[in-house]
Image: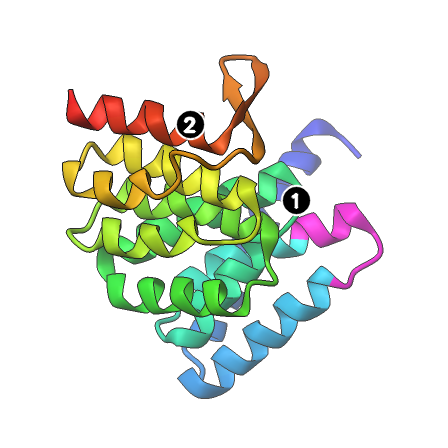
C-alpha cells in the first residue's frame, strides 16, 4: 500500500469514527450508560494488554461525554489501571468532568472510598480533587487520610499541601506521629519517609 493510500485510510477511519461516535452518543442515555459501563468492565478483563489499553482510552473519552453517576464510577474504574497512559487519560477526563459536573465526581469519589477496593485509583484521586480545587476539596481529601493503605493517605497529604489551604492543618496533625513508611517522588528519584514526616512537612508549608 502506498503512503498516499495509508494517509487516505487514516482519513477514512477518522471519518467513520466520528460518525459512529455521534450516532452512539445520540442513543438513549440509560441504555448508553449501561453499554459503556459493561464495556469498561469487559475491557478491564481483556487479557491482551494492548487491546485493553486501546479500549479503555477510547472508553474514557466516551464516558466523559455522558452525564450521570454511572459514568463517573466508570471513569474511576478506568483510573484503577496499572497502565500509566490509561491512568493519565482517565485522570484528565475526571478533571474535565469535575469542572462541569463536580457533584457527580465528588459522589463517585466518596463511593470509591467507601468501597475501598480500587487502590490504584484511590492513590490518584486526591490529585484530581486538588487539581479542580473546589471549596469542599479539603473536606473530601480528609476522608483519604484515615485509609488503612498508607500510600493512599500519603497521596492525600501531598494533595492537601498542593492546595495551600490552611484549613487542612488540623486534619494533617492527626498523622504527625504515624510511623508507617511511604514512598514519595522527588524529581526522578523515589524516597522513603514516614507518613508522619510527610504530614509534618505539609503542615509547615501550609502554616508558613
Left or right of residue 28, residue 139 in this image: left
* Pair 2/1: label in front: 2
Q: Residue at x 39, y 70 (%)?
A: 66
- Whether residue 19 is visible here, answered yes or no, is no
The local crowd at label 1, few if under 14, some if 14 to 19, many if 20 or more residues have their Cα within 10 Å, is few
Quadrant location, the N terminus: top right
The local crowd at label 2, few if under 14, some if 14 to 19, many if 20 or more residues have their Cα within 10 Å, is many
Up/down of 151 relative to 46, above or below: above
- Pick the residue in front: 121 or 34: 121
Residue extending furthest toward the front: 177
Q: Mark 2 vs mark 1: which is more N-terminal?
A: 1
- Pick the residue in front: 27 or 103: 103
Give the residue at mark 1.
9
Q: Do the residues labelled 2 and 1 touch (CB within 8 Å)?
A: no
Up/down of 83 relative to 136, above or below: above
Q: Residue at x 49, y 15 (%)?
A: 186
Q: Which residue is drawn at 31% across and 28% down?
A: 202
SS for tag 2?
helix
Q: Residue at x 45, y 39 (%)?
A: 155
- Whether residue 42 is visible here, answered yes or no, is yes
Residue 50 in magenta? yes
Give the residue at mark 2.
198
Left or right of residue 53, residue 202 in this image: left
- Pick the residue in front: 160 or 64: 160
Q: Which colour style is shown?
A: rainbow
* Cα distance between the residues tagged 2 and 1: 52 Å
At which x and y percent is residue 52? 72, 54
Left or right of residue 31, residue 139 in this image: left
Q: Magenta residues?
A: 45-54
SS for tag 1?
helix
At which x and y percent is residue 172? 31, 40
Residue 176 in magenta? no
Amino acid at each position: 500500500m502506498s503512503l498516499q493510500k495509508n494517509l487516505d485510510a487514516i482519513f477514512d477511519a477518522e471519518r467513520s469514527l466520528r460518525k459512529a461516535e455521534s450516532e452512539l452518543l445520540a442513543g438513549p442515555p440509560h441504555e448508553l450508560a449501561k453499554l459503556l459501563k459493561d464495556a469498561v468492565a469487559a475491557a478491564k478483563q481483556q487479557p491482551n494488554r494492548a487491546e485493553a489499553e486501546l479500549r479503555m482510552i477510547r472508553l474514557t473519552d466516551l464516558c466523559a461525554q455522558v452525564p450521570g453517576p454511572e459514568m463517573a464510577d466508570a471513569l474511576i474504574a478506568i483510573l484503577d489501571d496499572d497502565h500509566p497512559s490509561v491512568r493519565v487519560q482517565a485522570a484528565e477526563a475526571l478533571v474535565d468532568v469535575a469542572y462541569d459536573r463536580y457533584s457527580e465526581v465528588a459522589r463517585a469519589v466518596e463511593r470509591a472510598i467507601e468501597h475501598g477496593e480500587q487502590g490504584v485509583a484511590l492513590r490518584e484521586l486526591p490529585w484530581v480533587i486538588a487539581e479542580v480545587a473546589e471549596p469542599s476539596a479539603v473536606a473530601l481529601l480528609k476522608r483519604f487520610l484515615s485509609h488503612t493503605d498508607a500510600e493512599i493517605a500519603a497521596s492525600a497529604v501531598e494533595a492537601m499541601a498542593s492546595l495551600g489551604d490552611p484549613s487542612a492543618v488540623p486534619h494533617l496533625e492527626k498523622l504527625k506521629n504515624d510511623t508507617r513508611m511511604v514512598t514519595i517522588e522527588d524529581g526522578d528519584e523515589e524516597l522513603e519517609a514516614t507518613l508522619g514526616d510527610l504530614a509534618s512537612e505539609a503542615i509547615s508549608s501550609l502554616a508558613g
